């Protein structure tokens, strides 16, 4: 089974406009359209069985609308959408109860789009709340074009957060996107490799030397690496080919492509 642990989609009405806005903001071109049908079509072409969709709340008041949409797409067998939550939301614990009751398996946090450092006490409250409720927390890590002058989740910040939430020996539930920070891999290797935290491979595979990628996978532990693309910004077929070309053994390969994620999602 192949699971893409990091994708984005938008409601049909705003998909095209949202993609255009993000293309202008980030200087990246989407490789597919932005609707759930576009994602499912691309999954079929590339052999991806399930995709985790990660909704991002840029304002606290988007909580209900975005999560209602997310619940709707969760009815599709190919889709596992996480919930969105914003650190400036009031009653964080009540909202996390709602998220758990709605059947979500995890939440997405985007410190750059939410203009808050991941070490902020409100994020820490969210993360403790996730841990208590068995929710996965996927966090955007490293540079984002939306906030070029201040990274709100640096490897040092991730180090502090991971050590507080999942001290050595505990079961990881935090996923750091982009391998912990695509543009700061030296710091990732120095600070984060080997800690009880998942790395996803979104938006980083084609930028990283295969030997370095293999080294990070093996030093961090292949069990804590999740295959991910960041679709619609990266192509699943190309990303699967890159992973397959890293000369990993079959156990490592199958774990990264889907088994680790299936285990984490309990599916
Ligand atoms: Zn993303």
Image: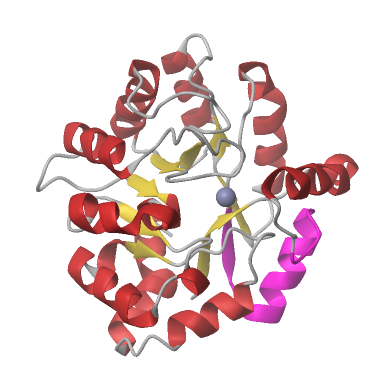
Q: Nearer the viewer, residue 251 or 265?
A: 251
Is residue 195 shown to the viewer in this render?
no
Q: Is residue 60 magenta?
A: no
Q: Residue 29, image x and y in percent?
A: 75, 60
Residue appearing at x 45%, y 80% in the figure? 243
Find the residue positioned furthest to the right.
Answer: 13
Left or right? Give the position of 113 relative to 218.
right
Left or right? Give the position of 214 relative to 139.
left
Left or right? Give the position of 5 relative to 169.
right
Residue appearing at x 60%, y 44% in the figure? 145
Residue 263 vs 162, above or below: the answer is below
Q: Residue 71, image x and y in percent?
A: 65, 39
Residue appearing at x 79%, y 48% in the figure? 19
Q: How many marks?
A: 0
> Picture quarter containing residue 190?
bottom left
Find the residue positioned furthest to the left.
Answer: 169
Residue 198 vs 218, above or below: the answer is above
Residue appearing at x 32%, y 81% in the figure? 211
Query: Which quadrant is home to the C terminus?
Result: bottom left
Residue 212 vs 69, above or below: the answer is below
Q: Is residue 32 magenta?
A: yes
Q: What are the residue bounds of the magenta stretch?
A: 31-52
Q: Nearer the viewer, residue 67 or 10?
A: 10
Is residue 247 shown to the viewer in this render?
yes
């Amino acid at each position: 089974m192949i699971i893409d642990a990091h994708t984005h989609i938008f409601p049909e009405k705003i998909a095209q406009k949202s993609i255009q806005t993000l293309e202008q903001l980030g200087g990246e071109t989407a490789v597919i359209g932005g609707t759930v049908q576009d994602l499912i079509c691309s999954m079929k072409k590339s052999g991806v069985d399930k995709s985790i969709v990660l909704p991002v709340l840029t304002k606290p008041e988007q909580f209900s609308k975005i999560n209602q949409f997310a619940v709707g797409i969760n009815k599709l067998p190919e889709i596992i959408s996480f919930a969105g939550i914003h650190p400036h939301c009031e009653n964080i614990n009540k909202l996390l109860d709602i998220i758990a009751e709605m059947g979500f398996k995890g939440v997405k946090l985007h410190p750059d789009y939410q203009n808050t450092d991941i070490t902020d006490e409100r994020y820490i409250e969210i993360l403790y709340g996730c841990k208590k409720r068995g929710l996965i927390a996927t966090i955007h890590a490293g540079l984002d074009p939306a906030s070029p002058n201040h990274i709100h989740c640096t490897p040092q910040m991730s180090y502090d957060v991971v050590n507080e939430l999942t001290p050595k020996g505990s079961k990881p539930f935090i996923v750091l996107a982009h391998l912990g920070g695509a543009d700061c891999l030296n710091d990732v290797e120095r600070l984060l490799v080997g800690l009880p935290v998942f790395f996803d491979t979104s938006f980083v595979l084609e930028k990283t030397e295969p030997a370095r990628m293999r080294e990070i996978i093996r030093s961090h532990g292949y069990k804590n690496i999740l295959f991910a693309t960041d679709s619609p910004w990266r192509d699943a077929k190309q990303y699967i080919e890159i992973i397959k070309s890293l000369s990993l053994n079959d156990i490592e390969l199958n774990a990264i492509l889907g088994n680790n994620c299936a285990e984490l999602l309990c599916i």
